[in-house]
Image (cartoon, helix red, strand yellow):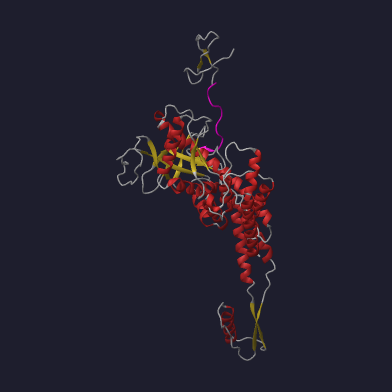
């Protein structure tokens, strides 16, 4: 016999519990043990008056760390490469609502269509949000957006009359007109429970604007690296140390090159140089050592000069150390493949290919984590606002991001097609379209039957007929494979 427990009130310390017997009759409530429903312990993250002190160095505490992280994000060469690649890849990512139910109801489908319409009407589109997301959160560790709702009704105007947003729908539901970014530079501290670490909002101070507390239930808060910390865990914490070491080496390298620029060796037949001799030598040295064309010196009798070169023996080792720390910074974002055979003089094409594949896996995992957080806040809130419009909804649509696909080399695609042809695998129109899309050079439309394309396999066709249809397509697939082989050969010649 099971026991169903439910909180029914009582003091905070003790609480009460109600039990049901096998006959279904409600029995008298039994007192719960003292503190049974209370949370035990604290977060243990160093939260004090809205400030979090979990970084390993006091210089990395928010909000005073913002100028440092902003400098690294904007001007550090390796981090700038990472940021630009993230933005370029994210341009191909689409946000969409999906249904997880095996047999979705009509209201499930209507809710999905509604969600897609809301995404399309967000100011700047989902693409603008995704670009801000990938160019800020992986580097700062967290990001904050104010979710601004809008009424999908004809003639409705936002409270700010200068706001141009208008909904093209007229269903009377609540949509989202803007995901308003709140920059880290305006962060003051957290509205947070010091004991549990539960965030209630972000306090913003953006002079000369008034002090504001932006509540979490009207916002989207996304973290990176540490989901239990409202400030996440940015790789820039580790980059900061590497960047300081690399900067010191670059300073030493610059000084060394300056000292290795050479010197002017002066020889004199005189026992002692006069004041005029010293003045002439200084003028000649300044003229000769200056980086200008046509420098010369006229030596008086008894003086000769020669420009001497000074080898900088430590230059190679210092340069290698600078490269090493640059690659380490890239490796913190799984992007060391960018430096193979470029920043570093070592590496291979195969290693670059493997590293690229691993980076795409990690990038897709990062985006899944971001969108999961967005869905749990933005998606859940959107359908809670409009739940009465979809009474038959069995499960709300889930917000997902389309994953990034690895680029497939034409040679690999040709090898795959040859294997498909060898086993006489039946191919339909969808297969042809997928092959054309992955090739990157063929139009993503099928030729007409009049142009010689064999008809697709009919429903219920026998296995023997399937094999016959596959053989009929052999000629076209063979020609496609030959074209790909020729294109691959041209690319190899171009690389050489």
Of the 4 image quadrants, the one containing the C terminus is bottom right
Residue 456 at what x, y percent from top left? 57, 44
Above or below residue 5? Residue 146 is: below
Residue 466 at what x, y percent from top left? 63, 41
Q: Is residue 46 magenta?
A: yes
Please tell me whether the stretch drawn in magenta is mainly helix, strand or loop: loop
Residue 167 at what x, y percent from top left? 35, 41
Q: Is residue 265 shown left or right of residue 51?
A: right
Residue 232 at what x, y percent from top left? 54, 42
- Say whether residue 200 is visible: no
Give the total number of marks visible in the rendering.
0
Name which residue lies at 64% across and 41% down. 465
Foreground pick, 492 / 321: 492
Name which residue lies at 36% across and 44% down. 210
Above or below residue 492? Residue 214 is: above
- Say whether residue 315 is visible: yes
Q: Is residue 192 shown left or right of residue 301?
A: left
Of the 4 image quadrants, the one containing the N terminus is top right
Foreground pick, 270 / 134: 134
Q: Is residue 467 magenta?
A: no
Q: Is residue 364 shown left or right of residue 184?
A: right
The magenta region covers 36-47
Foreground pick, 50 / 232: 232
């Amino acid at each position: 016999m099971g026991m169903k427990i439910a909180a029914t009130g009582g003091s905070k310390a003790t609480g009460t519990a109600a039990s049901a017997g096998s006959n279904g009759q409600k029995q008298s409530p039994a007192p719960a043990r003292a503190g049974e429903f209370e949370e035990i312990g604290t977060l243990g993250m160093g939260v004090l008056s809205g400030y979090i002190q979990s970084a390993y160095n006091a210089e990395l505490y928010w909000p005073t760390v913002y100028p440092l992280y902003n400098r690294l994000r904007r001007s550090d060469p390796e981090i700038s490469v990472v940021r630009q690649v993230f933005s370029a890849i994210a341009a191909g990512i689409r946000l969409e609502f999906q249904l997880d139910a095996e047999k979705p109801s009509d209201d499930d489908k209507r809710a999905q269509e509604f969600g897609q319409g809301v995404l399309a009407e967000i100011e700047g589109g989902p693409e603008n949000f995704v670009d801000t997301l990938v160019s800020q959160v992986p580097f700062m560790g967290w990001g904050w957006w104010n979710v601004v709702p809008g009424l999908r009704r004809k003639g409705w105007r936002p409270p700010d009359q200068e706001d141009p947003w208008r909904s093209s729908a007229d269903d009377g539901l609540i949509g989202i007109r803007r995901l308003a970014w709140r920059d880290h530079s305006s962060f003051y501290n957290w509205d947070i429970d010091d004991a549990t670490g539960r965030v209630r909002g972000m306090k913003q101070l953006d002079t000369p604007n008034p002090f504001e507390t932006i509540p979490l239930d009207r916002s989207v808060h996304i973290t990176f690296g540490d989901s239990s910390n409202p400030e996440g865990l940015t790789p820039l914490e580790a980059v900061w140390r590497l960047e300081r070491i690399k900067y010191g080496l670059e300073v030493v390298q610059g000084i060394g090159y300056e000292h290795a620029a050479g010197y002017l060796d002066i020889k004199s037949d005189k026992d002692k140089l006069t004041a005029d001799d010293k003045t002439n030598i200084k003028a000649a040295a300044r003229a000769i050592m200056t980086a200008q064309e046509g420098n010369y010196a006229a030596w008086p009798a008894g003086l000769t000069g020669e420009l001497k070169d000074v080898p900088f023996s430590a230059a190679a080792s210092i340069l290698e150390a600078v490269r090493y720390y640059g690659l380490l910074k890239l490796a913190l974002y799984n992007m060391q493949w960018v430096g193979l055979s470029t920043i570093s003089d070592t590496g291979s094409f195969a290693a670059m290919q493997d590293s690229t594949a691993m980076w795409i896996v990690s990038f897709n995992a990062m985006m899944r984590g971001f969108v999961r957080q967005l869905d749990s806040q933005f998606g859940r809130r959107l359908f809670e606002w409009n739940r009465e419009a979809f009474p038959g909804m069995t499960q709300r649509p889930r917000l997902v991001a389309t994953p990034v696909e690895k680029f497939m080399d034409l040679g690999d695609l040709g090898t795959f097609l040859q294997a498909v042809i060898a086993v006489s695998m039946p191919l339909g129109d969808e297969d042809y379209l997928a092959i054309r899309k992955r090739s990157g050079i063929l139009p993503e439309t099928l030729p007409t039957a009049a142009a010689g394309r064999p008809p697709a396999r009919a429903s219920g066709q026998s296995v023997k007929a399937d094999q016959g249809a596959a053989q009929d397509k052999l000629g076209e697939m063979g020609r496609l494979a030959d074209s790909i082989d020729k294109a691959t050969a041209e690319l190899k010649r171009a690389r050489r």
